[in-house]
Image: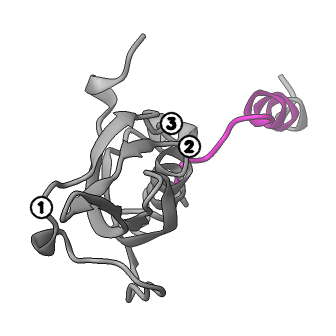
Amino acid sequence: MKPWILVALLAAALTGCESTEGLVADSPVTNQIQLTGTYYPLSEVDQAPVAVKQTPPSFPSKMRKAGIDGKAIVVLIVNEKGLPEQVQVEQATHELFAKAAIDAIRQWQFKPATKGGQPVAVRLEIPMEFRRDNELP
């Protein structure tokens, strides 16, 4: 076989192959959280908010292909109506996990926190873990 044919066959075989080299590089996320408006810290409410609708985060496909699990810590305000506001990631093992966590939590709904029998806005911190072995088939 001629050498140029071998090179052409090898190039054709590799066409469309996706490299995971750039995906396995660490890309941790650390943010300084800045929330605005009036809200209570969790320690100052009588009743903590309760999640009544939890949309699970989507595992980032690029991270799954690379065989990488991850974590994210999300900080948000649960308002008086039980809706998430100002959803931010404080820490994540990779920016793709941060985005997936934010996208999921923005869809959550809560029974709001109460203080003195009245619904109030509260700061909440939610850790999320992304593990391939926990995924549904």
Instruction: Report, in whole angstroms, how far the alpha carbon at label 3 lies from the one at label 1.
Output: 33 Å
The residue sitting at 38% across, 89% down in the picture is 32
Question: Is residue 58 shown above or below 100?
Answer: above
Q: Which residues are magenta?
A: 6-21
Q: Residue furthest front?
A: 117
Q: Residues within 10 Å of mark 1 (few under 14, many from 20)?
A: some
* Residue 90 appears left or right of 62: left
Instruction: Report, in whole angstroms, how far the alpha carbon at label 3 lies from the one at label 2.
Output: 11 Å
The residue nearer to you, when weighing 41 against 75, is 41
In this rendering, does residue 116 appear at all?
yes
Question: Is residue 80 shown above or below 34?
Answer: above
- Which element is circle 2 on? helix
* Label 3 sits on residue: 58
The residue sitting at 54% across, 57% down in the picture is 99
Q: Is residue 9 magenta?
A: yes
| Image spot of residue 93 (x, y percent) | 34, 63
Residue type of the residue flagged with mark 2: Lys
| Image spot of residue 79 (x, y percent) | 44, 63
Question: Is residue 94 shown above or below 3?
Answer: below
Q: Which disc, if any, is residue 62?
A: 2
* Label 1 sits on residue: 46
